[in-house]
Image (spheres, rainbow, N blue to C red):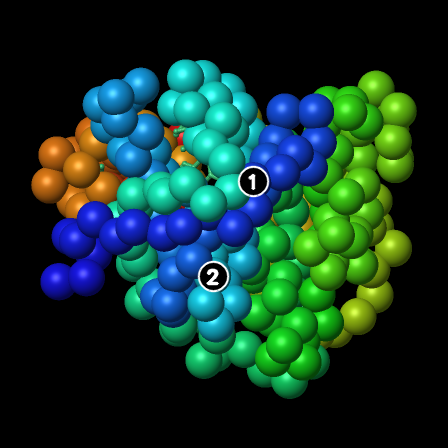
Amino acid sequence: MQKFVLHKGKILKNTRVSQDTYFLSFLSNIKFLPTEFVLIDTFPTKFLLKPFSIAVNDNNSVGIIYRVVGEGTKFISQKIVGEEIYYLGPLGNTYKFNEIVNSLRRNDLILLVAGGSGVASLVYLYKYFTRLGKKVKMFYGETTKTKIINLATFGIKNVVYTTDDGSFGIRGSVLEAVCEYFDNFSSISSITTFVCGPKSMLSRLKEIIETKLKNVFNINCYALLEEYMCCGVGVCRSCVVKVKKENTWEYKTVCKDGPLFSLSEVIF
Ligand SMILES: Cc1cc2nc3c(=O)[nH]c(=O)nc-3n(C[C@H](O)[C@H](O)[C@H](O)COP(=O)(O)OP(=O)(O)OC[C@H]3O[C@@H](n4cnc5c(N)ncnc54)[C@H](O)[C@@H]3O)c2cc1C
Ligand code: FES
């Protein structure tokens, strides 16, 4: 199967897009769907391959947006154009994504909510849904201006930026901006939300939806989860999360069952 084969791709671009974040693109004729991811080989720096969401997928290339947080991502940032990178993919379960796409109605609004490097996982969703003719709105928060990625360079226009310190966009957390948006929102269309960011942010959004928004709006929210990964294909169980099952819960793997989950079923 394609997902168990280590692919090789010549690097086309590896450029800085904010203080600590880069855009890497490489030659690949593999077709990816939004929410799918790749595992990139950073050996010998790191033994395990590193997971990254697909941000861009053209006819002959794939692009990821990655934040340098440790040795593996530093290794990738030092790669130069023309060098090869090795990766596994496409990985991830697209069943739920396809189900969402098929159930969308004409006037449904797509809301994308990104915290920090979680924005990387939402860029492809924006492109995909705008191409389908959907109205898409994005909220993107960082701690400070130097961390902000200018999403216009990825063709994303309808963005509300926030920073915790107010150095760019609206001052405060991205969820405060989302709540304010809903305070003034009067449309009767259904809202399909995708969120990616730190666990504390996902858990707070879940609370806001359950206590405030769900009573007023027809809103479904899906989270793209990130966990430490080892095998990437559902075997080692290193990436499990707790998910509701009837009156109890079960473990699901982010790599094989996810990374897309209904936010309401995730137990933080
Ligand atoms: C499905 C999936 C998709 C992802 N997509 C992207 C992406 O598109 N762009 C991007 O920048 N990052 C993404 N990540 C996170 C990325 O994989 C990690 O940042 C990367 O593996 C760190 O490797 P490292 O060797 O540089 O750092 P490490 O030495 O492994 O870790 C450095 C620091 O980062 C934290 N960290 C590392 N991995 C994770 C994780 N999975 N969850 C929470 N904290 C972590 C550690 O706590 C540590 O503090 C994704 C993760 C998953 C599971
Ligand atoms: S990384 Fe091995 S089961 Fe998910």
Q: Is residue 247 left or right of residue 123?
A: left
The residue closer to the viewer here, 110 or 56, is 56
Residue furthest to the front: 82
Q: Give the structural element (helix, strand or loop) at label 1.
A: strand
Disc 2: CA contacts within 10 A as few (<14), some (14-19) or many (>=20): some
> The disc labelled 1 sits on which kind of residue?
Asn
- Closer to the camera in the image, 123 or 113: 123
Q: Position of residue 20 (x, y in %)?
A: 63, 24
Q: Position of residue 199 (x, y in %)?
A: 49, 29
Q: Quadrant of residue 22?
A: top right
Q: Is residue 222 visible?
A: no
User: Is 225 drawn above or below residue 183 in the view shown?
Assistant: above
> Which kind of residue does numbered mark 2 sit on?
Ser
Residue pointed to by mark 1? 14
Question: What residue is drawn where x is 19% and y is 61%?
Answer: 2
Q: Quadrant of residue 145?
A: top right
Residue that lies at the very extreme toward the bottom in this rendered image: 106
Please report the residue visible at 62 percent of the width from the left and 66 percent of the height from the top.
Answer: 127
Where in the image, quadrant-wise, is ligand 2 located? top left
In the rendered image, residue 97, in percent from the top left (x then y), is placed at: 41, 65
Residue count near mark 1 (Cα–Cα under 10 Å), binned few <14, some 14–19, many ≥20: many
Quadrant holding the C terminus = top left
Q: Which residue is mark 2?
A: 61
Left or right placement of residue 145 versus residue 122 in this view = right
> Measured from the top left, where is residue 171 in percent x and y?
87, 28
